[in-house]
Amino acid sequence: MSKSPSPLILGLPKGSLQESTYALFKKAGFTISSSSRSYLPRVDDDDVEIRLIRAQEMSRYVELGMLDAGLTGHDWIVENGSDVHRVCELQYAKQGRKPVRWVVAVPENSNIREPKDLEGKRIATEAVGIARRWLEENGVQADVEFSWGATEVKAPELVDAIVELTETGNSLRANNLRIMATIMESNTWFVCSHKAWADEAKRAKIEQIAMLVNGALAAETKVLLKLNVKEDGLSEVIRILPSLHAPTVSSLSESDWHSVETVVEEHVVREIIPQLKAAGAEGIIELSLNKIIP
């Protein structure tokens, strides 16, 4: 890899995704550290400089070339209408790996049941463009206003409905709101400027980061199982084991014993370990993984 004359300026999301992003990059091999007030974290890679930027603004700064690359949501790329190169999708959020959703929420006792009921109503949201496009697609005219925060508490006293981002829906329910419609689902995307993508050295660094981060995400739900089994139990053990590919089987020094290892989804381990034991497996070891690179 040729060394870039200048480091890659990488924007990471400040706010709700910050800690999970730091943890993800740690598993990918990049240790990031910063003080609580710093927007310039340190990373143990001389070819990368980190900037902490709100996800809402990230794609604009990448498009303008003020950042070479960054992590932001599909929703904010759409909201900003940003012309950026999408490197890869990263399926993670604050509390899990499911996409987050932009939803229309109304008070529990509201008569608003379908899009047409929003005609002439007042709606508060941080994603004004997304909300307006959805209303237009549904042939509805409504007053959409930008919300500076605490959007859930504005209905019903200040607005008739809100368009809000949710991962679990818990905050909406806690504020006596019900979801009337889902406008958009969104995952995190690794994006870069077209200029950075055209730079050979920076593109190589971006692709390296993408590969390692995706490898870390792929490993999050999986573990490595290792075990020993006699020849007469080998076929049954292999039948029980789910795996990414065929399990790796090696002969041990004792001629009728084999070592078996494979990668499996973590949630199935509690079910298959008793089955493996019953099939004659011994010395079963479960190991966590940092990365899986296909």
Image (tube, rainbow, N blue to C red):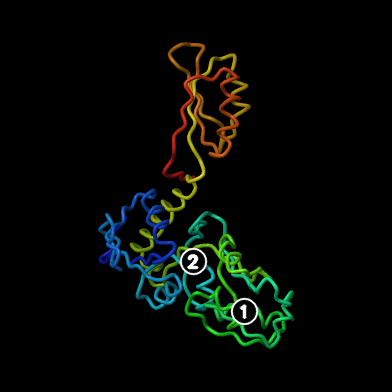
**Which residue is tagged 1?**
156
Q: Residue at x 39, y 56 (%)?
A: 209
How many neighbours does mark 2 have within 10 angstroms: few (below 14), some (14-19), or many (20 or more)? some
Give the SS element for disc 2: strand
Q: Amino acid at mark 1?
A: Pro
Front residue of 76/151: it is 151
Q: Nearer the viewer, mark 1 or mark 2?
A: 1
In which image quadrant can residue 61 be found? bottom left
Front residue of 202/31: it is 31
**Which residue is tagged 2?**
86
Q: Residue at x 26, y 67 (%)?
A: 6
Q: How many labels sit on residues?
A: 2
Of the numbered discs 1 and 2, the one sitting upstream in the chain is 2
Is residue 220 found left or right of 14 in the rendered image? right
**Quarter the N terminus occupies:** bottom left
Q: Position of residue 263 (x, y in %)?
A: 51, 36
Is residue 86 found left or right of 66 in the rendered image? right
In which image quadrant can residue 156 be found? bottom right
How many neighbours does mark 1 have within 10 angstroms: few (below 14), some (14-19), or many (20 or more)? some
Give the SS element for disc 1: loop
Q: Amino acid at mark 2?
A: Arg
For the residues labelled 1 and 2, say whether their Cβ atoms are less than 8 Å apart: no
Front residue of 162/268: it is 162
Q: Residue at x 39, y 52 (%)?
A: 23
Q: Position of residue 105 (x, y in %)?
A: 63, 72
Q: Position of residue 85 (x, y in %)?
A: 47, 69
Above or below — where is 246 with respect to 26? above
Q: Position of residue 63 (x, y in %)?
A: 42, 76
* Badge number at residue 4: none
Residue at mark 1 to residue at mark 2: CA–CA distance? 39 Å
In which image quadrant can residue 124 be found? bottom right
